[in-house]
Amino acid sequence: MDNEILSDAIRRAKKLGADQADILASKSDSVSVSTRLAKLEKVVQSVDNQQSFHFCQS
């Protein structure tokens, strides 16, 4: 997620009355390669995106 979008979400939460607001965003890319008898057997690529939003109002 773009930092500007995350900052805007926090500003909006505070404008709506949140006393505290935080956002965690992470992205990971991975590639797994398997070989057997010196030959390529399998290639697996994965992409993981996660966002966590916490807004608190007392």
Image: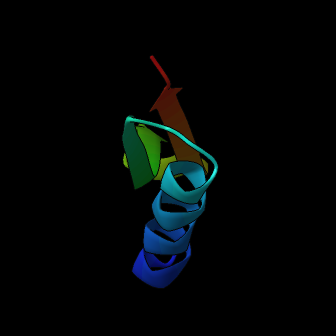
Whether 7 is drawn above or below 58: the answer is below
Whether 51 is drawn above or below 11: the answer is above
Whether 19 is drawn above or below 46: the answer is above
Image quarter of residue 32:
top left
Q: Name the quarter where the C terminus is drawn.
A: top left
Q: Camera-side residue: 43 or 18?
A: 18
Task: Please name the residue shown 56% across and 75% down the image.
Answer: 5
Task: Please name the residue shown 56% across and 42% down the image.
Answer: 17
Task: Please name the residue shown 40% across and 50% down the image.
Answer: 26
Relative side of 17 to 34, left or right: right
Q: Camera-side residue: 28 or 56?
A: 56
Whether 53 is drawn above or below 7: the answer is above
Q: Name the quarter where the N terminus is drawn.
A: bottom right
Q: Camera-side residue: 37 or 15?
A: 15
Residue 19 position within the rendered picture, expressed as x and y whole percent measured from the top left: 38, 35
Residue 28 position within the rendered picture, expressed as x and y whole percent measured from the top left: 41, 52
Relative side of 47 to 31, left or right: right
Relative side of 51 to 29, left or right: right
Q: How many marks?
A: 0
Image quarter of residue 20:
top left
Task: Please name the residue shown 50% across and 78% down the image.
Answer: 2
Q: Does the rendering let one see residue 1?
A: no
Residue 48 position within the rendered picture, expressed as x and y whole percent measured from the top left: 56, 46
Q: Camera-side residue: 46 or 17?
A: 17
Q: How is the image coloured?
A: rainbow
Q: Does the rendering let one see residue 2?
A: yes
